[in-house]
Structure formats: structure tokens, C-alpha cells
Image (cartoon, rainbow, N blue to C red):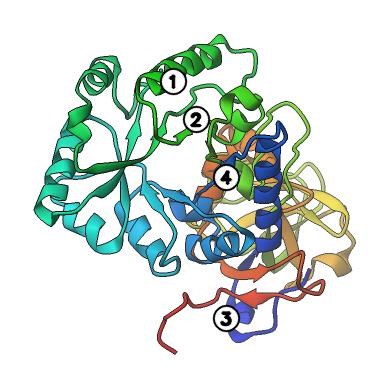
Amino acid sequence: MSFPADESARRAGAILTIDLGAIAANWRGLRDAGRAAGRPVDCAAVLKADAYGTGATVVGPRLAAEGCRQFFVAHIDEGIALRRVLPEHPIYVLNGLLAGTEPDFVQHGLTPVLNHLGQLNAWRAAAQRYERPLDAVVHLDTGMHRLGFGAEDAQVLINERGRLRGLRLALIISHLVASEEPANPVNGEQLSRFRNFVRAMPGAPTSLANSSGIFLGPDYHFDLLRPGAALYGINPLPGRGNPMLSVLTLQARILQTRRIDAFQTVGYGGAWRSARQSRIATIALGYADGYFRNLVNRTHVHIAGYNVPVVGRISMDLVTIDVTDVPEAACQAGATVEVLGPHLTPDDLADHARTNAYEVMTALGRRYHRAYVDGYADEPGDEQDEPDPPGAAA
């Protein structure tokens, strides 16, 4: 794939291509997995962290057009931005109600995920001030021990249902600790705790399964699936084949190729030394673009059918690669290399960086030129620039 021909792409050192059709197909597949048992299970989409680095205000409307009706974000500002392009859909804010933000939630039609009694009391007081019912989500902590009603607060809520007066309970949720480990007994323990709470608090829709949780089976599906990572191609089944479609390709431009003698060092600190006469290409990205510094001498890029090692330290704006074995015509200045894509997925790069694909995706830099394609609609190679949100000034 070559760089698009528009001006900003010509000026870019690297281009990130995001396939909206693949994201939509991943959502359909997860939704259908939830419905496989014949129950009317709905499927939301988690768009926090700018849709895992892919662009929430672009991805959200594409998923809405596909049939997704409910969306989750982490921060209220993420919800406000998403509301501009999704004027009608429920948007839930996972971090809940910060002090003094009640008017913002009401103004933008956002629903807080209530994580403790203090948030519940504040939201109920807001409903009284506005003299109308307000939607709310109750988050039960079944074992993560981060956010959510702990056992003591949950029992208070069970015993005193009147604390919800003035609120419409839109959803009860919890979050799985180790859903990517099907044999881990904590999954069953959390399921049991969640079921017990739901039995004591009947009448509201329920949601437990994140991306990996969907693959634990129908017992975990409840009324609403809540996938995030799998929508963006991250493998929800570590150690097994990835059932999700790849969503992005990151290409970087070669700025210069040079010859060096044997036993010469490359980059800061001389962290790599050539064992032979070599050709070294320098590509236009670095740790300022989310390409981790600890990848020094531990990963590769792909060019012209070759996996090419990254050598030397990762700089802020530059990465050096050993192209000695690549035909010279394929690695001249201006040629592009695949940094992420079918030959090296975010999961692969995460293994090299000793992190997870979530961090790889959410670290994707804003200096990249971003192009969006729809793999199920556009002609091959038909790219478009990142569109303006609906309603943006022309």
C-alpha cells in the first residue's frame, strides 16, 4: 500500500490506515457470538481512549450505522466529544460522577456509571434538582477491586432500594478480572457474585462480558455484551488463533539509506554494532509516536517480503533498520516499510515490547497521517482522510 496522494499525506513521515469495515465486522461477529444460544443479547461498543487509538468520533458513527446502540467511554470529556457525533445513542461514562459534573452529564445527555454510594447520592440529588428522573448504571465490584460497589455498599443498596428513587436504573454491570484465562476459577466466582446481586436487584438489564468474557460462553453474556479490545483486532484468546480481523496498518517512510563498514555502531550509545558491511535505513517515527524505547534490538519491520530487524536505540523521531539483505531498489529514500499490519500485529509488537496490545494501540501517535478505509465498501486502495465530525464547520 502506498501513501495517499493528498498534501498532508505527502508531508507525513508515517501513515496509519484504519479499516472501519473490519471494526464493524468484528462488532457483528461478537454480537452474533452472544446470540448463538438463541437469546436476544445486545452488543455495545467500548470507545474509551479514543477507541483504543483508532478515533472514537469516526468509529462511533460507523458502528452506529452497523446497528450498535450503546457506547461506553472512560472520561466525561470523551463522552461529550462522542455526543457531538452520536446525538441519540446512550453513552455511559465508566469513571462515574466526579464532584460538580452533574450539570455536564445532564447537559450532554450522558449516563454515569455509579461506583459507590457517594456517587449514587450525588446523582439522586441532581435528579431532585432537575425535577426529573435521570438514567444511572450501577457497577458492582465482584473481584477487580478497582471501581464499583463493594460487598458492604452493595448490601446497603439491596436493603434500601429507596436510595434509587428518582433514578432510572439503565444497567447493572461488573467487570471480569481474568476472562482471557478460561480455566481461572475467579471467573466462576465473579459470575456467582454477580448473579446473586442481580437476583436481589431485579428489573434492570445486566452486563458482565468484556471482549474475552464473550468467549467464556452464554452464562457470561446476560443482556449486554461490552467488547472493547476485540473490536480493534486485539486477540481476545491469548495463546490461541485470533478470531478477529486486523484493523490497522502503520507504514513509515524511509528517509535515508547508508552503507557502514563492519564493526560500526548505530544510534545513541552505540547500542548495536554491525557484524559485517551493512546497509542501514532510517525511518520516520520514534518514541514520540508511541514506538517504545525498549524495542531496541528486539523487533522488526516488514519490507518487500523481508522481515527487517530494528537496530540501535529508538530515538524520539527516528528508527534505524538493517536492510542489508533487502534488494537496494526496495529500500531507497521515500520507500515505505510496514511497522504494524498483517506481518506484525499489535499483539506481536506487544510481545516484543513486553507489554500488551492495549498499550500498543492506545500509544499510537497523533503525528501519523490517519486514513480511513472501509474494507467492505471501498475499492482496494481507496483511502480517505480523517473526516470532520458531523456538524463541524466547513
Q: Residue at x 62, y 49 (%)?
A: 232
Residue 312: % across, % down: 62, 46
Spatial distance from mark 4 to mark 3, Cα to Cα?
A: 36 Å
- Disc nearest the viewer among 2 and 3: 2
Q: In this orientation, does residue 340 appear?
A: no
Q: Seen from this angle, which residue lies furthest front?
A: 203
Spatial distance from mark 2 to mark 3, Cα to Cα?
A: 43 Å
Q: In this orientation, does residue 25 appear?
A: yes
How many numbered circles does the render carry?
4
Spatial distance from mark 2 to mark 4, Cα to Cα?
A: 11 Å
Cβ–Cβ under 8 Å for marks 2 and 1: yes
The residue where tag 1 is placed is 194
Location of the N terminus by quadrant is: bottom right
Q: Residue at x 29, y 62 (%)?
A: 108
Q: Secondary structure at mark 2?
A: loop
What's under tag 1, amino acid-wise? Phe
Comparing 23 with 199, the one in front is 199
What label sits on residue 155 in the rendered view? Answer: none
The residue where tag 2 is placed is 208
The answer to whether residue 180 is above or below residue 340 is above
Comparing 176 with 262, the one in front is 176
Residue 9: % across, % down: 62, 78
What label sits on residue 8 in the rendered view? Answer: 3
Crowdedness of circle 4 by 10 Å Cα count: few (<14), some, many (20+)? many
The residue where tag 4 is placed is 43
Comparing 291 with 358, the one in front is 358
The answer to whether residue 33 is above or below residue 3 is above
What's under tag 3, amino acid-wise? Ser
Residue 326: % across, % down: 87, 57
In which quadrant of the rendered view does residue 152 lie?
top left
- Judge left or right: residue 209 versus residue 218: left
